[in-house]
Amino acid sequence: MTAIGRRRFLGYVLAAPTLVTAAGPDPGLPSPEITDLLDLNDLMTAAALPTANLITVEVGPDGTVSFALPRAEVGQGITTSTAMLIAEELSVPVGRVRVTLADARPELVFNQLTGGSNTTFATYVPIRVAAAVARSRLMQAAAAELGVAPADLTLKDGVISGRVGRSVGIGELSGRAATTRTLRVPVELAARESFTVIGRPHNRIDALDAVTGRKKFTLDLDVPDAKPAMVCRPPTINGKVGSVANLAEVRAMPGVTDAVVISTGVAVRAATFGQCVDAVRALRVTWRPGTAEGKSDESVLRELRAAEPPLGLRPPTPVVEGSFTFHFRSNSALEPNCAIADVRADRAEIWSSLKSPIVAQQAIAARLGLPQSWVTVHVTEGGGSFGRKLFFDAALEAAELSQRVGKPVKLLWHRADDSRQGRTHPMAISRVRVSYLGGTVLGYQQRHTSVSTDLGHGLGEIITALAARLPGGDLSFAQTFFQLSQTMPYQFGVGGRLLNETDRGFNTGSMRNVYSPDVTCARELVVDRLAARMGRDPHRFRHDFLRDERSRAVLAAVAEAGEWGRPMPAGTAQGIAFHSEYKSVSAALVEIDCRPETVERPLRDGVTGPRVTKAVFAVDAGLAVNPRGLEAQMMGGVMDGIALALTSSLHLRDGHFLEASWDDYFYTRQWNTPPDLRIIVMPSTSDRPGGAGELGVAASMAAVACAYARATGAMPTTFPINHGTLSFTPKPTVPPIPPSPADGLDHAR
């Protein structure tokens, strides 16, 4: 083992967890955060390690390289970055690497969960090791073929050449390089200074198919006899079917083949989705109450306030305090929730974009009463997720419906279904108190009180998924999740943060991160107020209190590129904020226009309000495998941050959400997209990637909030800022809650 250097790894990874120990802190450095020693990304990576040896790379006779990625591609670009890793180690063009998505593989246990910005972080070494093992075997086979020593061979563009001019393609060697035995072999990974693919900007490998309509999503698949299906859902959250007055009439409607009651509503199967919509609208259902019956924004807010843990005794020194409310937000991806199911007596086959396919497979098997080995779950590429596809409700419904009717189905959620019955980011209150004396910050306390976030999808383990649904079963798990995903980036003396969750009556989940956008926004607003109280510039204050040089570098980058401190007209302002997570750091600078002529400008079918006119975002995510992909992710994060700060939230009334689709759920529109947008990917000396997928949102949201406060002179305490100004008066000809929520996309205004 002493002969294995820093770039040498074992191709066969022993199936045992690794214990990571940390040296004691240097007395001259600030005391470490728990996330400095172990964060959520570390935890997920360690859990995946025992099955890392089951990841394999396959070389075909035609010289192409294939890899079944045990993660879900939902638009974040991991198939591209994975192809780049393999291309680097095997010295083949990226275009010759074929990355597909692996079916549910129960033997992978914790190694098939997509979330927490963990994919590249966790798979960076295992994928490269698998490719390096293949390279080593190919070189040995080539040495035998060409009659030379492996050291005398070079591999480039998929061709192995000797010094005397003879060469052979890797495809020709694939059969001879294979072995029927499992071998434990040392491999040496390519050194960073030799990289020709990793770290270079690369277009997405699926970009052309995406823009030409050839990319295949779930409902594009041609499964024999799988006909469209939809579900008539309750008018209130999680209501249940009481009785159906006209099932026979609906079954006789044009194109309808089946109409049956399932656990979540009344499902119909028809020849077209249009006929499904007609049938759903025609159903006359009596509903039983749901889990949020009679609740509203105001009543949930009262529950949260009653559940807030105390901040402790107020210190005798000066303090800065703030309390911030964050409303429910939709987690509806661009691709509607959908799944295909073909259930027979002795087997079941499912197709869906799933980020926790092992748990989905286990849950579907339990719902159907079949052995798990009889259920095949195919993971398809998805059109967005942001945490939504960690849940597999569409796949469960499709499987249940297919079993009930004995036919394959293509089940699609109506857009309104996902806004009202799907997953939402929970309403929360975050309270902050900072104590200081002179120019010293003495302590920082934050209490985050939230509607319970459903973590029932587990971390790739069905036991966790079931335990989280028991009363009080996931309280400690949620607190652990909170502590391992949050960090204090400033040297703010003695501090602490606590999570308290309440009210399990809602269908909740993460949305482009779990707690960080709200927690960070509250903190950064108070940091701005603290800087003002101390008579300090917001940028310089952050710079001086940040805990490390890497953090200060991203802050300096946005300040310089965004011309921090430049003169601004009255009613406009700059805002700056910082966020760190999963061994990555980020900063944002925005400029906002809150002048009356901007806020009150007329817009067709839209809301106006302040406009973000400029955004500069800097990120250091360690080694960026594909800087172009990272840049695109951060662009999306900036748009999310603007939406969460200004416009996008759900309005709860009488146990239901009013918003139904994008026409009245106001995600960042073109009129509020900054015409001046710049993403700075910082150079990094790290040999490993950090977590990146969930960065972008928190710092951007906080910067917008800080800019708004400086432009208006009023600290915002409710988010999105215009939540209370949107008017949702139902149209006179449409009842507030139609008999079926599929009764149109825009009934709420």
Image (cartoon, grey):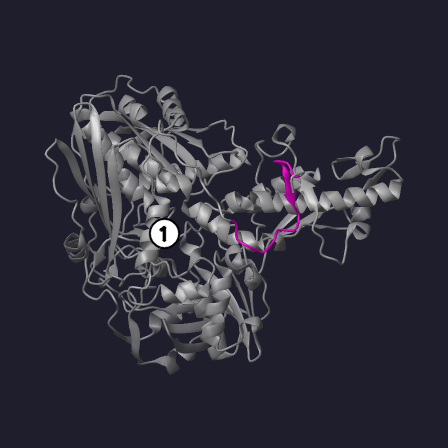
Residue at point 61%, 40% (across, down): 85
Q: Is residue 160 magenta?
A: no
Residue 189 in view in this figure: yes
Q: Is residue 344 left or right of residue 497?
A: right
Q: Alpha-carbon neighbours of circle 1 within 10 Å: few (<14), some, or many (≥20)?
A: many
Look at the magenta stretch and give its main secondary structure. Answer: loop
The residue lying furthest to the top in this view is: 567
Give the camera-side residue of 253 and 149: 149
Please tell me which residue is depicted at 81% across the width and 47% down the height of the picture.
173
Q: Position of residue 117 (x, y in %)?
A: 45, 45
* Vertical side of 637 occupied by 223: above or below: below
Q: Is residue 71 visible?
A: no
Number of marks in the rendered image: 1
Give the quarter of the image for residue 203.
top right
Quadrant of the snapshot with the N terminus:
top right
98 in relation to 338, above or below: above
Mark 1 residue type: Ser
Which segment did they paint magenta? 4-18
Q: Which residue is the extreme one toward the left?
A: 316
Percent position of residue 652, x then y: 22, 56
Residue found at the far bottom of this picture: 248
Give the image quarter of residue 125.
top right
On the image, the x and y values in percent for residue 361 come to 50, 66
Query: Is 187 rendered above or below residue 686?
Result: below
Q: Is residue 306 left or right of residue 674?
A: left
Q: Secondary structure at mark 1?
A: loop
Q: Where residue 740 sits: x, y (%)?
A: 31, 67
Q: Is residue 696 above or below residue 473?
A: above
User: Mark 1 highlights which residue?
Assistant: 510
